[in-house]
């Protein structure tokens, strides 16, 4: 009998910068669901990938001097590496620059054009480069999503007749309660739809980095109109062999709340226009916040997940993400809360339960439990009913992708098992030579741990495997969801002691080491006369070009004259960002030649010039005239 299919996707990530722990959250969530569904017997496909096109990529690649393709290829490799580190086992790594995707998008575009659902018109309005979003009006000229300045655009564009599908979409949302989850996001979408829909511009003539419209190649397909179909083209939709599409579609899309409208309005109306089934579910997650704001590279509050995984372990990080953020709501990241979770839930509760169980089997039975009688004590009954109840609740929560709730339920039985040890006092049973009762207690603990290892496996696959290993459970049949029944574990457990699962983290020691690492040796003191030897002035950059991979060559007005200054900042500043900028110039530094160009001064900047500590030019408050002394 063929298995039921389950197709789940993450958003495809913009390749305009490296991914951070905020983007890692939807991928770990999707991986957890994919693993869970596999365990429940589904034929699962899990897609993640990269959104390679768009104006932002075009600009960012220009800053680095790379071609857009080289630029996105490099970042795509970094993303793959991140998912490998995070133990995210996707089946498909989709990229919008794959030739078959471009062909399929062109075909989709043409089909809609021939049907009359795409037509040529003129676009006048505002555009946010950051969010790749068009706005008809914005009273303050700012993007309503990211708050950045919008740019005015007037151009010939192809439009998608989205207005035509508003009523049909409203009906669909009403008829399919599972289509948008959670409920609040469903209501939000219905709110957008209340006033009907406008047609949207789906091509651009001002950018090059994208998929050209094949019948009118000066137009490039709007980045979202190219990105959204990836979920289907990856399965062969509008391609040469669409059997996977027929088999696995419709999908469950996991997305962040910032891209709600694209997934609950644009994408479904596109599929309606093509006469195809809509996605099964759009599951909307909240954001991971850091210091109260959405984490993002541009805000400088992003956290590198690889670094965290190296320091604290992949499973600890996966656990934290799935436990700390209640699905659908925003959650807060802080290193302290991560450490708290590790120390309390992982080290104190789970790690402790495993190590004391394995330790006692080793100490009291030389590593091998004898066969135990079936007779139960009231403590046993209480433990079994807690484990069974929390298991039922956890499975239900898993089905709803409510992983935080599932983990919290699982921990009810982990904590109950630790309490069971205190209640049954195995050390006293040992002392009074009640061998059978002692073996029974330890068997109960092994069974609880086996259940726990199964239940946590979608979130913490490595830890689950290690628990099975230490308990000497090799038979795969004892690791399945179907085997979640107390008493399935054969009595004669033979343990294999191993490392502590989660060593406690000594916060004090970390803080001390960090303080030591950060302490920068100071330079010797100087007098005010020494300082007075420097001639520091405000300069205004008038022109700027790249002189080499690393160097910018600026013409700087220092009031009395124009100076040519070379600075090793090309990695961090684009020439166009320099022009008009006020800088602080050391004007009496002896001129030198760099790469054949004379440099007559130096711009002051902070930072080591490493990835962790990028260069930041020293800025001047207000608008002092060029040549103003800096003291
Ligand atoms: N390329 C589009 C998606 C196209 S899907 C057809 C995009 N890319 S993105 O890289 O900017 O964001 C991808 C996902 O990461 C979004 O769902 C976004 O919500 C999520 N996150 C980015 N920062 C996040 C947090 N700080 N917290 C949680 N999710 C976050 O949008």
Image (tube, rainbow, N blue to C red):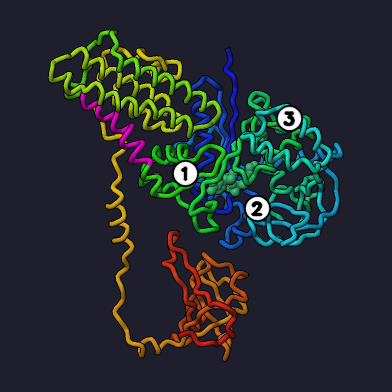
Q: Which of the numbered marks, if any, corresponds to residue 308?
A: none
Count the labels in the image: 3
In the figure, residue 175 lies in which quadrant? top right
- Horizontal side, residue 602 vs residue 64: left or right: left
Q: Quadrant of residue 208?
A: bottom right
Does the beta carbon at disc 3 come under 8 Å from ligand 1?
A: no
Q: Secondary structure at mark 1?
A: helix
What is the x, y in percent for residue 365?
18, 19
Which region of the structure is painted magenta?
341-360
Q: For mark 3, does the 10 Å Cα neighbourhood hold few (<14), some (14 to 19), or many (20 or more) residues?
A: few
**Above or below, 616 relative to 452:** below
Residue 410 vs 50, above or below: the answer is above
SS category of the residue bearing label 3: helix
Q: Which residue is mark 3?
A: 174
- Sooner in the amino-acid sequence: mark 1 or mark 3: 1
Which label is found at residue 145?
Answer: 2
Q: Which residue shows up at 29% across the image and 11% down it? A: 376
In the rendered image, which residue does mark 1 sit on? Answer: 81
The answer to whether residue 96 shows anywhere in this view is no
Q: CA distance from mark 2 to mark 1?
A: 30 Å
- Which one is in front, 337 or 48? 337
Figure check: 531 above or below 451: below
Residue 358, visible in the rendered structure: yes
Q: Nearer the viewer, residue 181 or 302?
A: 181
Residue 530: image x %, image y %? 35, 88
Dominant SS of magenta comes to helix
User: Which x, y percent locates residue 425?
Assistant: 21, 23
Most foreground residue, 214 or 235? 235
Where on the picture, by quarter, is residue 277? top right
Distance from Cα at disc 1 to Cα at disc 3 = 41 Å
Return the x and y of residue 341 as percentages of the image width and height.
38, 41
């Amino acid at each position: 009998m063929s298995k039921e299919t389950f197709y789940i996707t993450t958003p495809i990530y913009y390749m305009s910068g490296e991914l951070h722990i905020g983007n890692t959250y939807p991928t770990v969530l999707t991986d957890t669901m994919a693993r869970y569904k596999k365990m429940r017997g589904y034929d699962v496909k899990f897609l993640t990938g990269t959104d390679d096109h768009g104006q932002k990529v075009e600009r960012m690649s220009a800053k680095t001097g790379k071609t857009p393709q080289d630029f996105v290829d490099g970042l795509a490799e970094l993303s793959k590496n991140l998912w490998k580190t995070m133990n995210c086992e996707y089946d498909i790594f989709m990229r919008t620059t794959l030739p078959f995707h471009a062909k399929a998008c062109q075909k989709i575009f043409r089909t809609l054009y021939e049907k009359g659902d795409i037509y040529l018109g003129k676009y006048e309005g505002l555009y946010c480069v950051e969010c790749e979003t068009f706005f008809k009006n914005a009273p303050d000229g700012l993007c309503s999503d990211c708050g950045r300045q919008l740019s005015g655009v007037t151009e010939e564009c192809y439009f998608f007749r989205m207005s035509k599908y508003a009523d049909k979409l409203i009906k669909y949302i009403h008829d399919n309660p599972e289509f948008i989850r959670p409920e609040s996001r469903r209501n939000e979408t219905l709110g957008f739809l209340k006033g009907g829909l406008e047609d949207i511009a789906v091509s651009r003539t001002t950018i090059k980095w994208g998929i050209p419209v094949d019948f009118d190649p000066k137009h490039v397909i709007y980045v979202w109109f190219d990105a959204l179909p990836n979920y289907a083209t990856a399965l062969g939709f509008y391609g040469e062999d669409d059997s996977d599409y027929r088999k696995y579609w419709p999908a469950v899309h996991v997305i962040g709340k910032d891209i709600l409208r694209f997934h609950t309005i644009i994408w479904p109306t596109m599929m309606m226009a093509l006469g195809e089934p809509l996605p099964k579910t759009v599951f909307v997650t909240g954001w991971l916040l850091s210091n109260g704001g959405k984490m993002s590279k541009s805000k400088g509050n992003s956290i590198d997940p690889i670094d965290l995984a190296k320091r604290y372990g992949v499973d600890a990080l996966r656990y934290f993400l799935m436990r700390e953020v209640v699905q659908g709501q925003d959650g807060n990241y802080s290193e302290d809360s991560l450490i708290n979770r590790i120390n309390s839930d992982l080290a104190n509760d789970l790690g402790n339960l495993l190590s004391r169980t394995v330790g006692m089997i080793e100490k009291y039975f030389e590593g091998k439990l004898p066969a135990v009688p079936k007779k139960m004590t009231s403590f046993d009954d209480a433990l079994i009913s807690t484990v069974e109840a929390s298991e039922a609740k956890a499975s239900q929560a898993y089905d709803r992708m409510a992983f935080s709730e599932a983990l919290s339920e699982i921990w009810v039985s982990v904590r109950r098992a630790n309490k069971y040890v205190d209640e049954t006092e195995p050390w006293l049973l040992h002392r009074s030579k009640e061998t059978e009762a002692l073996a029974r207690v330890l068997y109960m603990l092994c069974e609880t741990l086996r259940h726990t290892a199964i239940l946590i496996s979608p979130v913490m696959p490595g830890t689950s495997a290690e628990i099975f290993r230490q308990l000497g459970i090799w038979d795969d049949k004892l690791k399945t969801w179907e085997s979640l029944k107390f008493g399935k574990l054969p009595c004669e457990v033979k343990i294999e002691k191993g490392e502590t699962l989660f060593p406690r983290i000594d916060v004090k020691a970390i803080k001390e080491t960090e303080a030591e690492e950060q302490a920068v040796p100071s330079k010797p003191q100087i007098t005010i006369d020494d300082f007075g030897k420097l001639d520091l002035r405000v300069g205004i950059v008038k022109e700027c070009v790249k002189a080499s991979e690393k160097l910018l060559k600026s013409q700087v007005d220092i009031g009395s004259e124009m100076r040519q200054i070379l600075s090793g900042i090309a990695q961090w500043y684009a020439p166009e960002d320099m022009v008009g900028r006020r800088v602080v110039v050391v004007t009496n530094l002896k001129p030198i030649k760099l790469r054949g160009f004379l440099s007559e001064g130096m711009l002051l900047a902070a930072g080591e010039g490493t990835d962790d500590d990028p260069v930041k030019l020293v800025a001047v408050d207000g608008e002092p005239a060029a040549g103003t002394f800096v003291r």
